[in-house]
Image (spheres, coloured by chain):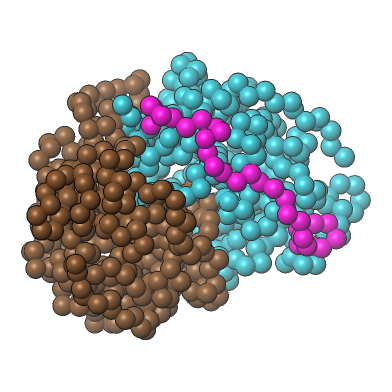
Chain colours: A brown, B cyan
Amino acid sequence: MPELRKDPVTGRWVIISTDRSKRPGDFSRERVVLKGGFCPFCPGNESTTPPEILAYRPGENARPDTAGWNLRVVPNKFPALGIEGDLDRQADGMFDKMNGVGAHEVVIETPDHGETLATMPLKRVEDILWAFRDRILDLKQDRRFKYILVFKNHGEAAGASLEHPHSQIIALPILPKQVVEELEGARRYFANKERCIFCDIIRQETEAQVRIAAENQDFVTLCPYAPRFPFETWILPRRHESAFENSPSTMYENLARMLRTILSKAVRVLDNPAYNLVVHSSPMQENTNDFYHWHLEIIPKLTKTAGFEWGTGFYINPTPPEEAAKFLREAKVTEPQPVFQ
Amino acid sequence: MPELRKDPVTGRWVIISTDRSKRPGDFSRERVVLKGGFCPFCPGNESTTPPEILAYRPGENARPDTAGWNLRVVPNKFPALGIEGDLDRQADGMFDKMNGVGAHEVVIETPDHGETLATMPLKRVEDILWAFRDRILDLKQDRRFKYILVFKNHGEAAGASLEHPHSQIIALPILPKQVVEELEGARRYFANKERCIFCDIIRQETEAQVRIAAENQDFVTLCPYAPRFPFETWILPRRHESAFENSPSTMYENLARMLRTILSKAVRVLDNPAYNLVVHSSPMQENTNDFYHWHLEIIPKLTKTAGFEWGTGFYINPTPPEEAAKFLREAKVTEPQPVFQ
């Protein structure tokens, strides 16, 4: 008998197929493979991107938009939102609209076209997290913005249009619906229990140890109780913190370590899958609060199509999170050498 | 400047790219093509499906599970939910679950493997709608069910695993989250205005005539103001009716006509796209109400991947609905001959 499970935060019910559950080899997914061709993000091609907003450069080279960087942040050449102008909220008959004002930036994670978050030196992964933080803190000063979305599409199947390792940052003048729902769910739980729902999840899951995929001193990685997708995975800080950018600076190294570990495990178990990585954090106006707990969500793109879910918001997940967590937990990975030039 | 638009029902903001908007030829979609092979839904292969629940047969032949039918409804051979048993709602620590009890049926729409809703005789399309109604009325008698989801995945890219024309019916013991959101939005609007929000949308859109794709005596087809997807299209009955199955029987012919017309236009404009079709209707417990207005939603699968939307619930739509509606409105289609053997 399949099981219906309710996500405790959003209240969404999902079907978990417990009978004929899909194991990693059962998905007819596309492996991520490099195809090559001209890359605007590779060193030497700096002039093909808009001028950099931020860069980490070792040693003496401080000339912007030239080679020699470890990481660059540039405006998206084809931004979804425009940075200039007022919101100009207005009615359109019975409808509501505003100007698409916002920021859309690209974090070029490494000069090395061929490495990934799962294979790069730890310090590089940590630098990417610092770049997220630096950009969030800067964008927060713009009072037009309400939410900053930080995400990564890895592989064409997950929506990446360029293969050079990169993440994206979008500053929005509104709260995305899914953010509102998560916040409201967490707020409702707090109103009732006077505890953070994510703190409670961490406590229950680390005791039960059935949906835990990996742990370290500061972070817990688990497959959530009612996941929409097979092998959906969340990385949560053990200590309650409402916003990503407010985390104590000592945490970023352990987050980098956890992220690289879990992605290495996913590569091994799921044969180099495409995935989406999304930072879930508090909106700018409620930056410090007791009810919301920032975390990362990783969704491997395993099912080739999922048409019906779009239209209905109703999810059928063929892999129970207990099995996904077990596969990930037991996957042996060799940590790359912690060397950084 | 792109535009941010708010869906009046759910309150979801979407980005509409108004500058570099994508025209039909700009999408690198997959055309739906038939591949052939053994088909369990073709006449003569009735024994390869579970025994039929309902069939429409012309003339004298009344023997179930034999050839000679115009339409068959059978249980899904690999159901997402099990029909037997109690819900057995229970806690799982801080989480909630219940048995996956429900019905999962397949409507085999025609004996002809190669025809589609866009090409089949009108009477056949109408019969499919009648079959939806017959099955909904029957399933409604089971008090364990709260919602009946009627949908169609057309083409592999939209999630269809078999190419023979078919739709699916899933009876659920819970309300899917998206249904709850739509209902709540409509209820909120009604509480405020004492009018149905969809009736208001129909009134405004038919007056403005910028997002209307097609109209007939009983139905209006429009591209909604804040669509998540390019060429997303809704078919709404002009007269307020909260549930699909409660529509006056005279309406089904005009709905069939409208459905065939709009899908023919989509085939022409978008080069035979894969799509999802979903019936949006009131839950069984609130079958007759003033605030919700049943309708069909059609979502062509045009973007090969849309990874980031999954993770964020935030949508960037590259085609304004005004342009989509214009393409559909102006597409010339020759109606198939209204002949039915």
In terms of image quadrants, where is residue A99?
A: top left
Using the image, determine if residue B324 lies above or below residue A126.
above
- The residue located at (70%, 53%) in the rendering is B163
Q: Is residue B330 magenta?
A: no
- The residue located at (77%, 67%) in the rendering is B48
Q: Is residue B43 magenta?
A: yes
The one of A205 and B92 positioned closer to us in this rendering:
A205
The answer to whether residue B306 shows anywhere in this view is yes
The one of B58 and B110 positioned closer to us in this rendering:
B110
- The residue located at (58%, 54%) in the rendering is B159
Residue bounds of the magenta highlight: B17-46
Residue B106 image offset from top left, x and y in percent: 66, 57
- The residue located at (27%, 44%) in the rendering is A46
Residue A152 image offset from top left, x and y in percent: 32, 55
Residue A276 image offset from top left, x and y in percent: 36, 58
Using the image, determine if residue A43 lies above or below residue A78.
below
In terms of image quadrants, where is residue A186?
A: bottom left
Q: With A309 as the anchor, is A185 left or right in this view?
A: left
Quadrant of the snapshot with the N terminus of chain B: top left
